[in-house]
């Protein structure tokens, strides 16, 4: 069974509270999502391997450390996952970025794939999938399936707000994928929206409603 990490640092809680408010507009919503993504990214990248490297400071030689090994790829689920990319790129500017386009059918709530473009060597990379909302878990599970079909073996899922139903679905279908969230909310409503949640993340990021 995969692990669920709740990153509930006071700054993350504070920023998420502002994002949840219906009074918060798109500009602030986007900025806060970027800031939270950076804070979460700090924890998500905690296990990046390091190797020793000989350097010289202005004062003396020393053995320092640098990140090595598997390279990183960030894969947002369009559209809303895009809002988490820049915060992660602030931390790891050399990461490659792939895109998976999925939307939820309004009636069935089932994901529909419309786009997939990934780095050619994606299977050699450590992959962080980003999507602010883990509701039924259908979109995340399909994105994880697509990555595994292309040979990825080292994947983490990074979400902002999750419903217990979505976590359970991902854990069952992808027990090897650890999940990182800022908050686990109560439940889904009849429209499969997270309660209390923050509404439609894509619309709030891009101002489309
Ligand atoms: C939202 C969200 C997730 C999905 C979560 O996307 O960004 O991708 O719903 O729901 P699920 O866990 O039940 O699959 P949406 O379909 O609204 O598309 P958008 O990001 O393009 O607005
Ligand atoms: N997608 C969203 O954007 N919000 C939800 O609450 C559920 C799915």
Image (spheres, rainbow, N blue to C red):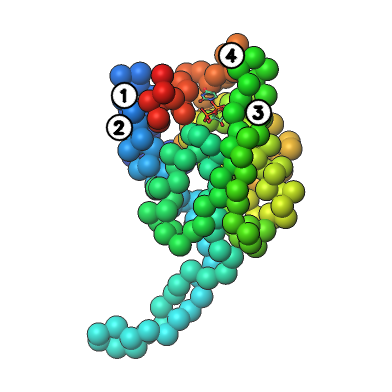
| Residue at mark 1: C-beta within 8 A of ligand 2 | no
Dot 2 or dot 4: first in sequence order is: 2
Residue ranking furthest to the top:
190
Instruction: Determine whether 198 is above or below 16 in the image.
Output: above
**Residue 125: x %, y % from top left:** 61, 60
| Residue at mark 2: C-beta within 8 A of ligand 2 | no
Q: Nearer the viewer, mark 3 or mark 2?
A: 3
Residue tagged by mark 1?
24
Left or right: 124 as drawn, with respect to 38: right
Q: Which residue is drawn at 64% across and 14% down?
A: 107
Can you say which quadrant of the picture contains the N terminus? top right
Tell me the tag on residue 28: 2
Dot 3 or dot 4: first in sequence order is: 3
How far is disc 3 from disc 4 in space, using C-alphas? Answer: 14 Å
Classify the position of ligand 1 by quadrant: top left, top right, bottom left or bottom right. top right
Tell me the tag on residue 111: 3
Residue tagged by mark 4?
191
**Residue 30: x %, y % from top left:** 36, 35
Dot 1 or dot 4: first in sequence order is: 1
């Amino acid at each position: 069974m995969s692990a669920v990490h709740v990153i509930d640092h006071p700054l993350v809680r504070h920023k998420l509270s502002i994002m949840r408010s219906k009074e918060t507009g798109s500009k602030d919503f986007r900025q806060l999502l970027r800031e939270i993504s950076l804070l979460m990214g700090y924890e998500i990248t905690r296990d990046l391997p390091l190797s020793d490297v000989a350097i010289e400071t202005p004062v003396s030689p020393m053995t320092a450390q640098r990140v090595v090994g598997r390279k990183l790829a960030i894969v947002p689920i369009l559209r809303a996952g895009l809002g988490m990319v820049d915060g992660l790129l602030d931390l790891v500017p050399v990461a490659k970025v792939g895109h998976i386009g999925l939307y939820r059918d309004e009636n069935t709530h089932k994901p529909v794939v419309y786009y997939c473009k990934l780095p050619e060597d994606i299977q050699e990379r450590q992959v962080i999938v980003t999507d602010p909302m883990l509701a039924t878990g259908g979109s995340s599970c399909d994105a994880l399936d697509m990555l595994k079909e292309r040979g990825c073996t080292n994947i983490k899922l990074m979400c902002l707000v999750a419903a217990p139903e979505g976590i359970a679905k991902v854990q069952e279908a992808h027990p090897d994928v650890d999940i990182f969230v800022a908050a686990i909310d109560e439940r889904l409503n009849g429209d499969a929206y997270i309660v209390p949640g923050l509404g439609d993340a894509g619309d709030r990021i891009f101002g489309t409603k």
